[in-house]
Image (cartoon, helix red, strand yellow):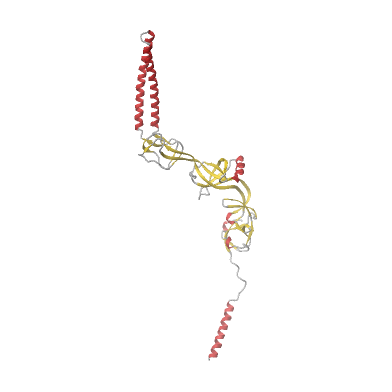
Amino acid sequence: MFVRFMVRRCFILAMTTLVTACSHKPEGKPAAPARVPVTASVVVQKDVPIQVQTIGNVEAYSTVTVKTRVEGELSSVCFKEGQEVKKGALLFIIDPRPFKSSLNQFEANLTRDKALLKKAETDTLRYEELFKKGVVSKQEYDQYQTSFEALGATVKADEAAVINAKLQLGYCSIHSPINGRIGKLMVNQGNMVKANDTMLVTINQTKPIYVRFALPEQELSAIRKYMNQRNLRIEAIVPKNDANPSVGELTFLNNEVDVSTGTILLKAIFANEEELLWPKQFVTVAITYTTQHDAVVVPSQAIQTGQEGKYVYVIKPDLTVESRPVATGNTINQETIVTSGLRSGEKVVTEGQLRLVPGSTVEIKNDGEIHS
């Protein structure tokens, strides 16, 4: 009985092994390797501007710190912080009552002294006739003549005092000396302010506006070369607004190199009508020297760097890839000029390179968006 059981068990094990082996037997051709999903772009040939990029700092075309020229109570503030103002716009009023009182006093003194001067003139003319007739002595005549001249000087001093009082009264109204944008208010209404001491507010002129930047001294010869040929086009690119750069012109090249940094200071002026540029703001500055015609260009993310230098993955018509070494030039707006190694119309991989080796088969995810 036991022998029959063992024979049956061995038979079952043998059949199971045979069935398992048959089920794993390959049928037909081996499965094709999986395709690697990638995104691609077409190599293009076009005119490309030759540029140098650096970081710049925006500065106001002019800055005015507004102070009062008279002492008194700040009775009125005639603007809102951050407001744009025109030249001549009323900004502050200092309490004018003490200055009006002084002006009235000086005008009264002038009127009185003019009357005294008129009387002294009449007396002098009368005593002059009497002196000629011998009725009065020369000493008496000289006394009236001196009094007349002294009153004349007093009237002139009174006139000067009236003019000065009018100026002081005029200083009670403070107007904007430039077109610009108001900053933070430093002194609130009701405070006492001192002449030529208290800072009231700062005005920055932002239309036009400057951008200051520095370039390595190695660029000096190119800058001077192209400046002599034409006005250099300067673009100021605000962060997160690459598609809408402000365009200006180079206006200033410093007369010496900064020996501590090895750079040369430059300035460009921008119309800034839309006020995209703001004082003290950092921007990317692009200086366009010239244009390279019919340059071969690829997206910068297609360029890879290996032990033997830079290379790209080129997609062949059968959707396999090859690694091809390339030589590159300038990079402009996330595109790189390829000086050798590629032809216009070829497709290159822009994303997914980490999963590729030469000969890999790819699937182009954005095939409908690119054109060869």
**148 or 79, which lies in front?**
148
**Which quadrant is the C terminus positioned in?**
bottom right
Q: Is residue 96 left or right of residue 317?
A: left
In x, y percent, where is residue 186? 40, 41
Where is residue 287, by image quadrant?
top right
In x, y percent, where is residue 101? 34, 30
Q: In this view of the protein, can residue 201 be seen by the observer?
A: yes
- Point out the residue furthest to the front here: 139
Q: Is residue 203 left or right of residue 212?
A: left
In x, y percent, where is residue 243? 53, 49
Instruction: Give above or below for 330 relative to 34.
Output: above
In x, y percent, where is residue 190? 35, 39
**86 or 278, which lies in front?**
278
Instruction: Give above or below for 117 relative to 312.
Output: above
Q: Is residue 305 left or right of residue 207?
A: right
Give the residue displayed 57% in from the left and 80% down from the top: 19
Where is residue 259, by image quadrant?
top right
**31 or 327, which lies in front?**
327
